[in-house]
Image (cartoon, rainbow, N blue to C red):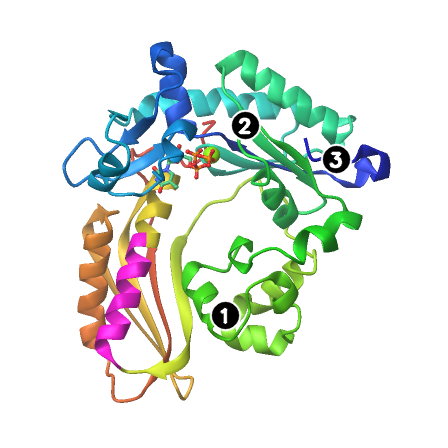
Amino acid sequence: MNTKPEHIDINKLNILHIDMDAFYASVEEMDNPHLKGKPIMVGGSSRHGVVTTANYEARRYGVHSAMPAFMARKLCPHGIFLPVRMNRYKEVSKKIFKVYHEFTNLVEPLSIDEAYLDVADTGMDSLSVAKEIKKRVHETTGLTMSIGISYNKFLAKLASDWDKPNGMTIISQDMVPEILLPLSINKVHGIGPKSSERLNNIGIYTIRDLLTLSEDFLVDFFGKHGSEIYNRIRGIDSRPVNTDRERKSLGTETTFSEETNDKEVLKSYILDFSHEIEASLNKNRIQGKTVTLKVKYEDFKVRTRSKTLINDISKADEIYEIALGLLDEVKLDKKVRLIGVTISNLSSSDLEQLSFLD
Ligand code: TTP
Ligand code: MG
C-alpha cells in the first residue's frame, strides 16, 4: 500500500476514485472458480470481435481491452475466450454501487465499474472508509478493486491506477511534486495518444516538461481544455463529485502542430477517433444516433456538420463511415488546424438509465 499516514492530514483527502479490477473477467472467475489462475479474455468470440477485457494472467501476454480477438489469440493461444454476459455484470455493478451508497450519497458513476465518492460527510476518515468499502464489496461480490484517495478527482483517479490490482493509494498535497513531476504526459486525464505524440514531437515527455509551457500555449494547443490541463498538472482540480451526471455527448478532437488540408491525413485522424469513441461507448454501455464532425481552419473559422441516423450506432467502422461522409461536405480550400468527431443523442445500450442503481 502506498500510504504514508504519518505525514498526512487525512481529513482533507475526501475524494475516492474506485475502479474494479479486470471487471468482466473477475466476475467470470467468481462465477466459474475453475477459471481462476488461467488467462481469460471476455469477448472476441466472433471472428471480427474485440476483447472487452482480459484478466491479469492474460495481460502478461500483452492482451488488453479493445484488442482484436485474432491478435489476442495469437499472443495467448491457450487463453480462454468467454462471451460477454452484460446482464450479469450489471447485476454485480448494482451490488457494488449499493455498498458505496451505504457510506455516502455523493457517488458519481463513471462507468459500470468506476466511480468517484466524496466521503467528507461520512463521519469517518477516508482511509477507513476506503478499507471498509473494499471489505464490504469483497464480502458481497468476491471481487477486488483499486482505490485512490486524494483531495481532488484528478489525483484520486491517478492514485487508483497507481497500484492495480487490489491497490489502495493515497496522494496527499505534499506528495504531489514527487508524484507528478516524473509522470509521463499520457497519464494526464485529457491528454490522449495523439496529443501526447504531438507533445513528444516538441520535446515534452513528462509533467516536468509540460510545466514549462504557459497557460496560453496550452489553450492554443488543446483548445478549451487547455486551462484545465494547466491546472491539473499543478495538482489543482475543482470539479465536484457530480451525482446526477448524464452524458450528452462523447467525442475527441485534436489540434495539429502543423496545419494541413491533406484529406488522407484528416481521414487517418478520423479513423483513430472512431476507435477511441467505440471504446468509450462500449465501456459506458451507451450508443448514439448523431455523428458530428468539427473542423477549425487556419483562420480559426469553425465548421461543423452532423448526421442523425434512425438507428443507434456504436461501432468504429460505422462512425468512421458517417464522419467521412461529413468530411466530403466541408471545403478543404483552406488548411485545417483542428479536427474533431463527436457522437451524441446517446442512450443506454439496453434502454435502461445510465444510472446503475435505478
Ligand atoms: P476498465 O475499468 O477500463 O478495465 P478492467 O476493469 O477490465 O481492468 P482494470 O483492472 O484495468 O480496471 O473497464 C471496465 C470494464 O468495461 C471491463 O471489464 C470491460 C469493459 N470495457 C469494454 O467493454 N471495452 C473497453 O474498451 C474497455 C476499456 C472496457
Ligand atoms: Mg476496472
Q: Is label 1 in a helix, a strand or a loop?
A: helix
Local crowd size for mark 3, using a 10 Å CA cut-off: few (<14), some (14–19), many (≥20): some
Looking at the image, is mark 3 or mark 1 earlier in the sequence? 3
Residue tagged by mark 3?
120
Quadrant occupied by the C terminus: top left
265 vs 37, left or right, is left
Q: CA distance from mark 3 to mark 1?
A: 37 Å
- Report whether residue 345 is seen: no
Quadrant occupied by the N terminus: top right
At label 2, the amino acid type is Met
Q: CA distance from mark 2 to mark 3?
A: 21 Å
Residue 286, magenta (yes or no): no
Disc 2 versus disc 3: nearer the observer: 2
- Report whether residue 71 is seen: yes
Looking at the image, is mark 2 or mark 1 earlier in the sequence? 2
Q: Indicate if the residue with disc 2 has its beta carbon within 8 Å of ligand 2.
A: yes
Q: Is residue 170 above or below residue 141?
A: below
Looking at the image, is mark 2 or mark 3 earlier in the sequence? 3
Q: Mark on residue 145?
A: 2
Task: Choose between 113 and 238: the one closer to the eye.
Answer: 113
Task: Choose between 126 and 108: the one closer to the eye.
Answer: 126
At label 3, the amino acid type is Ala
Q: Which residues are magenta?
A: 262-275
Secondary structure mostly seen in magenta is helix
Q: Is label 2 in a helix, a strand or a loop?
A: strand
Ligand 1 is located in which of the four quadrants? Answer: top left
Residue tagged by mark 1?
199
